[in-house]
């Protein structure tokens, strides 16, 4: 499964790239597949497509429900590269102090 989703994340089709992220939202909320979640988000970081950005932003938000520290670390490490759309979704349910830190320049 992981290889297939990583291949989807590299697709030229925006909907396939988005599907690579959104197909993992439900298991990510349950705390499953964190390494794969972060790999998919990393593979999609440079996407300029807002639908893809929303998709992996939602994925990160879902993963943060059970792995907030790891997702916050990922966001902070990639703060310069992560588009604002994805960032805002990813940090949406985090505590205020973390949201402010992630949004700070």
Image (cartoon, grey):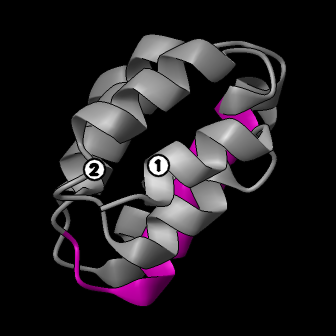
Instruction: Magenta stretch: give its range.
Output: 47-63
The answer to whether residue 101 shows anywhere in this view is yes
Q: Is residue 25 left or right of residue 15?
A: right
Determine the residue positioned at 32% across, 71% down.
Answer: 83
Q: Give x and y (percent) for residue 101.
A: 49, 44
Q: Give x and y (percent) for residue 51.
A: 49, 83
| Residue occupied by mark 1 | 102
| Residue occupied by mark 2 | 79
Determine the residue positioned at 34% across, 81% down.
Answer: 14
For numbered disc 1, what is the local secondary structure?
A: helix
For numbered disc 2, what is the local secondary structure?
A: loop
Determine the residue positioned at 78% across, 16% down.
Answer: 66
N-term mark: 2 or 1: 2
Q: Are marks 2 and 1 in contact (CB under 8 Å)?
A: yes
Q: Nearer the viewer, residue 99 or 54?
A: 99
Label 2 – label 1 distance at C-alpha: 7 Å
């Amino acid at each position: 499964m992981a290889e297939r989703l990583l291949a989807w994340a590299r697709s030229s089709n925006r909907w396939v790239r988005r599907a690579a992220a959104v197909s993992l939202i439900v298991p990510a909320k349950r705390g499953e597949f964190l390494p794969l979640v972060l790999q998919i988000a990393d593979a999609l970081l440079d996407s300029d497509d807002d639908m893809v950005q929303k998709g992996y932003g939602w994925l990160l938000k879902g993963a943060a429900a059970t792995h907030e520290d790891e997702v916050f670390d990922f966001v902070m490490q990639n703060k310069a590269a992560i588009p604002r759309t994805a960032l805002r979704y990813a940090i949406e349910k985090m505590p205020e102090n973390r949201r402010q830190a992630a949004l700070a320049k």
